[in-house]
Image: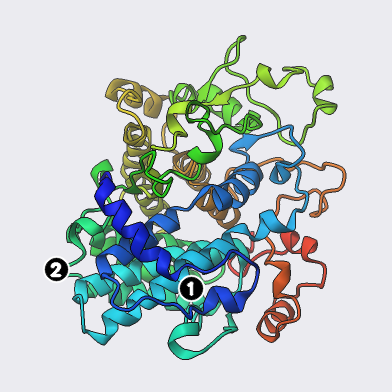
Amino acid sequence: MKLTIYKIVILLGAMLLFQTSCDDNFAEINTNPQVAINIDPGFQFSWVQLRTSGGRYENWRAGLIYSSMMNQHMAALCGYWNGDKYTFNGGYNSSLFDQAYREQVKDMQDLINTLEQGEVGDQTMLGMARIWRVVIFHRLTDLYGDVPYSEAGLGAIAGIDFPKYDTQAFIYADMLSELEAAIGQLGSGGFGSADLMFGGDVAKWKKFGNSLMLRLGMRLSEVDAGTAQTFVSKAIAGGIMTDNSDDAFLEHTNGPEGINRNGIGEVLDKANGFGDDCPRLSATLVNGLQASGDPRLDIFGIPAAGGHNGLPNGLDATTIQDNPTGTDINDFDRINPLLVTVSTPMMFMTSAEAQLLAAEAAVRGWTSGDAASLYNKGVTNAMKQWQHYDASLVIEDATIDAYLAANAFDAANGLEQIGWEYWLATFLNEYEAFANLRRSGFPALTPVNYPGNVTNGQIPKRLAYPSGESGRAPFEAAKSAQGLSNDFSTYMAVPVWWDVN
């Protein structure tokens, strides 16, 4: 839904009371000596949803410069787009960590604490808040590994200035348990119109919660198949997203004060005065779409003068001169501007993802569902989801049917097909695309080996923590437990717990 100007102004005035300075001090991020008393829980929930969608800072750095490049949705010649070449920039690496603990974790924990006390709100509000807390933390742990979790956000509440880092195994077990309990709390009541994603629709929240459980359960497929199967089966039995009306996203607008702009749009929306012109669609993406006759090619990209052409990853202004498919950045596809305005939605999870994950569960023999039917439904929904961005981005049913006929599901190669389609369905949801790539191993990307890369020419496995954490006891313990060195640039080559591919 579109956030009204009135609500934004009141929300901004209320929530700015307890924002802290933007330095790299975890104590100041985690504590809040000026916490506002009796903040309306609806306003607070709206605020956290918007901050989870994020601003230009982290969406540019962790989302685009790193994640979109490392998973090869996009490519760039500019040297500061470090993820294209696996080079290290400490501030870019830590950007999501910094912003999430400053603007999301603390405020969400404060809201949950208020709701648990029962003086305001209701159980449905609490269930929604607990689900959203999982949204925040599963993104953090997927990108960084072990992170502050059980004690995070308790500075003002419990005086814990430097929370311990929990293991990713513990975090995943608790997030799955939290989802199960939170879904059970969803009944009457809720946040109503203050819920900027579903407008308080409890049925949609239940599907969203179960779909998150499916995603998180499947994340454990290679490291703990038994737990994965248990929660995947629970999620599907509970009812997951089935069509595009279930898709979980936040609408955005261009103002006021920039508080509700899409953070990706704040980087790439040239029409509204932003516009970093470095990224292009990657050769991996464009070539794959062309090979399969995928109609999404014309949705994702604006072709160069000579037709659709993807930029290979790992090139710069010098090495591009030896590239046979184009020697100038303007020889390659730009991202369709309709997808990256400051007013376009920010996707958190789609029915396409849920259906494709259910198809994977069927391929693995974990459920009795028909893998081919679920796959076809997932692809169909993925083709249609772009209408959320602009009504003109329509792919006709006949075109989708023709694509499915030409690229029929083959159970023998089912995991690879599902992995490819999931990668396409998560275009612009780059944190998730990067996570599932590492978990599944699909699509099988060819890494780059640019001079000065920090991963020995292998696709990175995570981002690095803020350097300001060095020397603090909780971080030093987590660093040792994960086998990390004192050189933060080396972290990008170290897999997180669930990544054993």
Establish if 218 lies above or below 107. Answer: above
Residue under label 1: 172
Q: Can you give x and y, in whole percent of width and height, for residue 260 in the image? A: 39, 47
Q: Is residue 226 left or right of residue 47?
A: right
Residue under label 2: 189
Q: Residue at x 46, y 84 (%)?
A: 156
Tell which of 82 and 277 is nearer to you.
Answer: 277
Q: Can you give x and y, in whole percent of width and height, for residue 409 in the image? A: 42, 37
Q: Residue at x 82, y 72 (%)?
A: 486
What's under tag 1, amino acid-wise?
Tyr
Query: Contact, CB < 8 Å: mark 2 with mark 1?
Result: no
- Which quadrant does the N terminus fall into? top left
Q: Considering the numbered disc 2 on the image, is that residue within a helix, a strand or a loop?
A: loop
Which label sits in the foreground, 2 or 1? Answer: 2
The numbered disc on residue 452 is none
Q: CA distance from mark 2 to mark 1?
A: 28 Å
Q: Residue at x 52, y 67 (%)?
A: 102
